Amino acid sequence: MCELQLMKRRVSRLGVALIALGVSLAAFHHLVLDGIPGLVGSKLFAEDTVYASGYSDRAFRRVQTGMTMKQVVELLREPVCVRTDPYALAKFSGSTECWAYSHSPSDTNYRIRLICFRDGLVRAKRAEYWFD
């Protein structure tokens, strides 16, 4: 086989390997609530997350858009706090309140768990690692 054909094969195999790696990383990113930045960040920086009593990641994953407030309380119990400030609602236009299921007592790096409602129904949920 000539050298050009060997090089084309290697490039082709490398392309397939890179695509497979990209798909694997994307799938892994969705398996971890905080994504890859949260996984890496929590290993590199001190974390200060306090969760609401009764909170679990498993239950948080079960919360879906359109659920009622009552259904959310049945899954996660009461939130740490209810936020109605414009800053909390800015990313969720149309939401009227957001329930926080985590916070940082020292106001530093922590895992955000937030569920936002409009008209008593889940409009959005947010899970990420906050770097401060």
Image: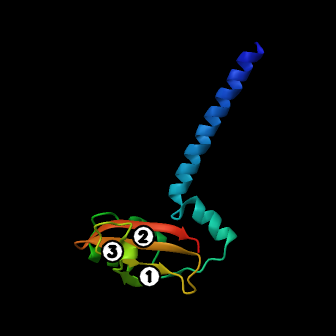
Q: Position of residue 109 (x, y in %)?
A: 59, 76
Residue at 33% over, 78% down: 73
Residue at 40% over, 84% down: 81
- Residue toward you, 115 or 56: 115
Amino acid type, callout 3: Val
Residue 49 occupies quadrant: bottom right
Q: Earlier in the sequence, mark 1 or mark 3?
A: 1
Amino acid type, callout 1: Gly
Q: Is mark 1 on a helix, strand or loop?
A: loop
Residue at 34% over, 71% down: 116
Q: Which of marks 1 and 2 is nearer the N terminus?
A: 1
Q: Position of residue 106 (x, y in %)?
A: 58, 86
Q: Mark 1 points at which residue?
A: 54
Amino acid type, callout 2: Phe
Quadrant assignment for the N terminus: top right
Q: Position of residue 29 (x, y in %)?
A: 54, 56
Q: Name the residue under label 3.
A: 72
The Cα atoms of the two marked residues, 2 and 3, are separated by 9 Å
Q: Name the residue under label 2.
A: 60
The Cα atoms of the two marked residues, 1 and 3, are separated by 12 Å
Name of the residue lying farthest toward the left:
119
